[in-house]
Amino acid sequence: MIFDDDHIVIEGDHVGVRGLCAQFGVNEWPPPEVLEIHGMRLVRERYSLITDEERLSMSHVARGAVYRVDHVAREFDTTDLVPGSCCATCGYPIEATTGLGSSAPQEGNISICLNCGEPQLFAETPMGWTTREPTVKERADIETRASFIEASRQIRKRGRIWPGA
C-alpha cells in the first residue's frame, strides 16, 4: 500500500526529480529495488523504513525513496550545441540536447531551459546548433501547449539549479 504523500526522488548527473509514488507507477511500500521509467534504469539507494501499519498511526509524516540513474537506454540521441550556447533568459549554459530516437533538433523546435523553465527555439548557425529566444508570437503559441506548461511548471516548482541571472 502507498499513501498519497509517499514520494520518490531521482538523482543523477544533471537530474534531480521528485514526484509522488503514484506518478512513477509505484503502488506498494517498500518500493522496488529497480524502476524502469522512460528508458532509464533507476536503482533504489535508500528508503524510509516506516511500515504501512506504523504510517497509519502517524500524522505529518511522509515516506520517501531515493533512486539514482543507473542506465539510460540507447534510444536517446544527443546533439552537441555550439560552445557558449546559453539560455537567453537566465544565462544557463546549454552544451547539448537529448531527444528520443533520431530526433536531432530541427530549426524552430522547442527547447525548455532546465534551469528557469523558459522556452527556447533551436536555431542552426554556420557553426552548428544553438538556441534563441522566441519572438512574442512564437512565445504566445508555445505557452498554450500542455506539454510545455507542465514541464515549465515542474522546473519552476523545483527551483533553479544554477545561480546565473
Image (cartoon, rainbow, N blue to C red):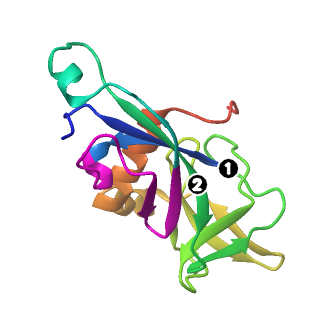
Disc 1 residue type?
Asp
Give the residue number, with chain letter if any, for mark 1. 13
Q: Is residue 7 left or right of residue 99?
A: left
x then y, percent, for residue 139 = 43, 57
Residue positioned most to the bottom: 102
The numbered dot on residue 158 is none
| Residue in the foreground of this view, choosing between 66 and 14 | 66
x then y, percent, for residue 20 = 30, 41
Q: Is residue 111 visible?
A: no
Q: Secondary structure at mark 2?
A: strand
Given this view, does label 2 or label 1 mark the residue nearer the observer? Answer: 2
| Residue in the foreground of this view, choosing between 48 and 162 | 48
- The residue positioned 82% from the left and 56% from the top of the image is 84
Is residue 153 highlighted in magenta?
no
Q: Residues within 10 Å of mark 2 (few under 14, many from 20)?
A: some
Disc 2 residue type?
Val
Give the residue number, with chain letter if any, for mark 2. 69
- The residue positioned 21% from the left and 30% from the top of the image is 52
| Residue in the foreground of this view, choosing between 139 and 155 | 155
Quadrant containing the C terminus in the rendered view = top right
Residue positioned most to the left: 56
Q: Is residue 126 left or right of residue 51?
A: right
Disc 2 to disc 1: CB gap under 8 Å:
yes
How far apart are labels 2 and 1 at the CA level? 8 Å
Is residue 32 highlighted in magenta?
yes
The magenta-colored residue range is 22-43
